[in-house]
């Protein structure tokens, strides 16, 4: 693969070791396909940023989340960076292990961090070691560990989902299937539905169908994750089961299709572009690259139904 970049640059952009990047570039094997794609994406990002790379500020984005949500962040971030009147490079790290990713950021040339990770003491300590402006996305950290917070509150998002489920079920009896529930989002959901029986599971087809077969009283679905809702609909169909209410998160292509087909009742949507715009602006202001005050921008979750689906390009 021809490119003008040093292995160190590609490794920094991809969030990988130089040895791993070297193996990918020279087709030596021993790396996963996802790692190869990560290196290719890093080179593409460097190509896009090349015109300003010599004087650009570098913003790292560390996300402990699904690949689907990470892809949505990349699209929104690229759209916002193109409109910022300051030369900026971004490095996206989608990971199941935020601490090593944060430590790698600390060893690189970074001017700021946007982070989505559980608000644990370990994460707070890793963030504090960086010595760069930090903005938290969705899950917040103590104020002394970051300069600003943007995004939706996961507890409130879960509570909003529960409110919709209860209102749409009205007086009908029935249990609620909670799929991929975890953390503050599930806690918020449970706080509003103390009188309903909640059945929890992951999104795998086999266990899901077994749960449906063994729980005929399930009448509503809450998909707390960010992907796989078409498979959930298909599992109900395979078991010849219906549901009265289905509430999900994230306005991606799959959920838009399900909304338009009236197979999802409502989707809770986050304006990622606005959240990432505010995050980048806070970092740039902290670095003296933009005028204006540094502020947090909590955002309200948007409720999308089959009747107000916005036009979108995927």
Image (tube, rainbow, N blue to C red):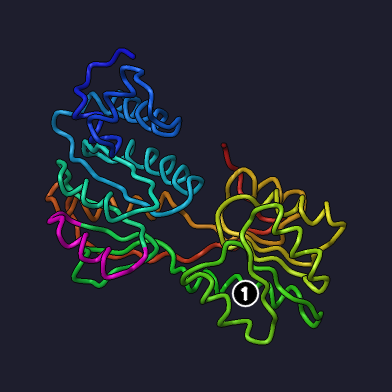
Quarter holding residue 41: top left
Residue lying at the far front of the rendered structure: 30
Question: Relative to residue 304, is residue 29 drawn left or right?
Answer: left
Quarter holding residue 179: bottom right
Residue 303 placement (x, y as % from top left)? 60, 63
Number of numbered discs visible in the structure rendering: 1
Residue 6 placement (x, y as % from top left)? 19, 22
Question: Relative to residue 22, is residue 222 drawn left or right?
Answer: right
Q: At 64% across and 50% down in the image, what residue appears?
A: 255
Residue 183 placement (x, y as % from top left)? 47, 70
Question: Relative to residue 253, is residue 145 drawn left or right?
Answer: left
Q: At 65% across and 53% down in the image, what residue appears?
A: 204
Between 189 and 213, the one nearer to me in the picture: 213
Residue 242 placement (x, y as % from top left)? 84, 62
Between 288 and 76, the one nearer to me in the picture: 76
Vertical placement of residue 231 versus 169, above or below: above
Q: At 28% across and 28% down in the image, what residue appears?
A: 21
Q: What segment carries the magenta color? A: 118-133
Residue lying at the far right of the rendered structure: 240
Q: At 14% across and 32% down in the image, what residue appears?
A: 55
Is residue 121 rendered magenta in the image? Answer: yes
Vertical placement of residue 111 versus 7, above or below: below
Vertical placement of residue 76 versus 113, above or below: above
Q: Categorize mark 1 by other alpha carbons within 10 Å: few (<14), some (14-19), many (20+).
A: many
| Residue bearing the label numbered 1 | 162
In the rendered image, which quarter contains the C terminus?
A: top right
């Amino acid at each position: 693969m021809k490119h003008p970049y040093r292995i160190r640059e590609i490794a920094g952009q991809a969030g990988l070791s130089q040895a791993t990047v070297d193996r990918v570039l020279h087709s030596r094997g021993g790396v996963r396909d996802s790692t190869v794609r990560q290196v290719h994406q890093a080179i593409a990002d460097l190509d896009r940023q090349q015109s300003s790379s010599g004087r650009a500020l570098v913003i790292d984005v560390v996300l402990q989340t699904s690949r689907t949500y990470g892809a949505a962040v990349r699209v929104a971030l690229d759209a916002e960076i193109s409109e910022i009147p300051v030369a900026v490079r971004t490095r996206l790290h989608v990971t199941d292990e935020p601490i090593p990713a944060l430590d790698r950021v600390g060893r690189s040339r970074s001017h700021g961090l946007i982070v989505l990770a559980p608000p644990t003491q370990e994460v707070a300590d890793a963030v504090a070691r960086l010595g760069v402006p930090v903005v938290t996305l969705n899950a917040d950290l103590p104020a002394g560990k970051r300069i600003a917070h943007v995004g939706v509150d996961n507890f409130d998002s879960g509570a909003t989902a529960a409110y919709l489920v209860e209102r749409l079920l009205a007086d009908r009896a029935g249990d609620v299937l909670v799929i991929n529930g975890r953390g503050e989002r599930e806690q918020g959901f449970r706080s509003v539905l103390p009188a309903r029986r909640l059945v929890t599971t992951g999104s795998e087809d086999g266990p899901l169908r077994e749960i449906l077969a063994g729980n005929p009283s399930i009448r509503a679905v809450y998909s707390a994750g960010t992907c796989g809702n078409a498979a959930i609909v298909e599992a109900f169909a395979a078991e010849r089961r219906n549901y009265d209410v289905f509430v999900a998160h994230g306005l991606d292509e799959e959920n838009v299709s399900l909304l338009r087909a009236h197979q999802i009742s409502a989707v809770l949507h986050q304006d990622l572009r606005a959240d990432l715009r505010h995050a980048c602006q806070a970092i740039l202001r902290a670095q003296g690259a933009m005028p204006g005050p540094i502020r947090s921008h909590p955002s309200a979750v948007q409720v999308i139904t089959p009747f107000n689906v916005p036009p979108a390009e995927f």
